[in-house]
Amino acid sequence: MALRKTTTRAAVLASRYQTRGRKTGATSDAQNGPLAAENLTKGCNEVPSRKRSSVKIEEDEACGSPKTLKSDDSPSTDISGCKQEPLDLKEEPITSKDDCASWSPANWMRIVENIRKMRKDVPAPVDTMGCDMCHDKEESPAIQRYQILVSLMLSSQTKDQVTFAAMGRLRGHGLTPENMIATDESVLQELIKPVGFYKRKAIYIKKASQILLDSFGGDIPESVEELCKLPGVGPKMAHICMNSAWNVVSGIGVDTHVHRISQRLGWLPPDVIRKRKKLENLTPEDTRIALESWLPRDLWSEVNHLLVGFGQTICKPVGPMCSECLNCSICPASKIKW
């Protein structure tokens, strides 16, 4: 599937708005409302247009660098409008929480409350087909945790509807570590197809299942560090898995929706963007560290589900429905002509 090259104009405006708001000392919602409209209008006139092109990408297994997709292993992805998340992100972020010290975005509480209202009124695929809805609740706790992990491995660069259907086929086949190891790789590929990168994910599932049997008695690890050692598991999956499988909030899971919307809303500190030099160089890990530096911990568990559903229904990758968004008057991205 051809993906539109990342556009970061919204994040540029968001960064400029946040920086200008701080310089003028505008910090409250009442102060920032008029300031937002004035600065965003100026920002739209200052940001040059970017040419758009269609590219095909696949993240290299070793280093996450792009390469051409093979026709028989194309992903079923949401066009993100921002840099795609690698299948197995092991890269260390250059962002630290020191880069975000004493910083928080304008109007963020109003924005969160408005998104809650919109999510309540408009159901999203993640509400009924998300990774925490794909496991068999009649199975033992250990098998349920294993199935949650597998659903997360399948979900990378794949729509919830496709992941949910693939998990149904796997469960019908018998989704246990033992059975996945015994299943021929070609059979496993057919069971999970057409999830994104299904051939590689079939390999990851078999390898991870063997590790879980050998080292964890068929259960899954209880820490982000150990989860990230499994093939095909990156920080986003690990943090969501800790929350969904172990009921432990270890961090914010940043997928393509959270990554994109955080840029559009101006939720990334200007220092973080400057350190990466270009917005398109920001990784999901940069976004996670930035969000965790200012977002209250009691919201960490909620924010992924909140923004994913919002990104699926209103703040879409292509053609966001700004006119229907309750944050239209205070969102930097709403001034862009999509």
Image (spheres, helix red, strand yellow):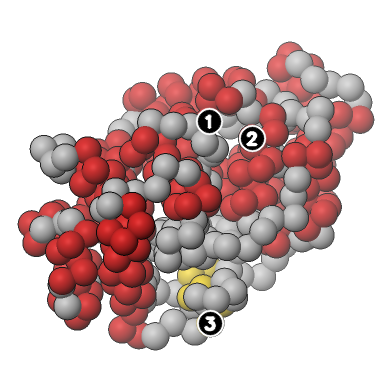
Relative image position of residue 158 (x, y in whole percent): 36, 60
Residues at circles 2 and 1 in contact by the CB criterion of under 8 Å = yes
Q: Is residue 17 left or right of residue 195?
A: right
Question: Please, which residue is most extreme toward the right here?
Answer: 23
Tell me what residue is drawn at x 63 percent, y 63 percent.
91
Instruction: From the viewer's side, name the closer residue of 12 and 208.
Output: 208
Report the residue marked by disc 3.
67
Going by the numbered disc 1, the residue's amino acid type is Trp
Element on which disc 1 rests: helix
- Label 3 and label 2: CA atoms lie apart by 31 Å
| Labels 1 and 3: the sequence-earlier one | 3
Q: Earlier in the sequence, mark 3 or mark 2?
A: 3
Badge 3 amino acid: Lys
The residue pinned by badge 2 equals 292
Q: Which mark is residue 300?
A: 1
At 84% from the left and 37% from the top, the residue drawn is 19
Residue 207 visible, this orientation: yes
Local crowd size for mark 3, using a 10 Å CA cut-off: few (<14), some (14–19), many (≥20): few
Which residue is pictured at 49% across the width and 84% down the height? 68
Asked whether the beta carbons under mark 3 and mark 2 sit within 8 Å of each other, the answer is: no
Cα gap from disc 1 to disc 3, whole angstroms: 33 Å
> In the depicted view, which residue is nearer to us: 187 or 302?
187
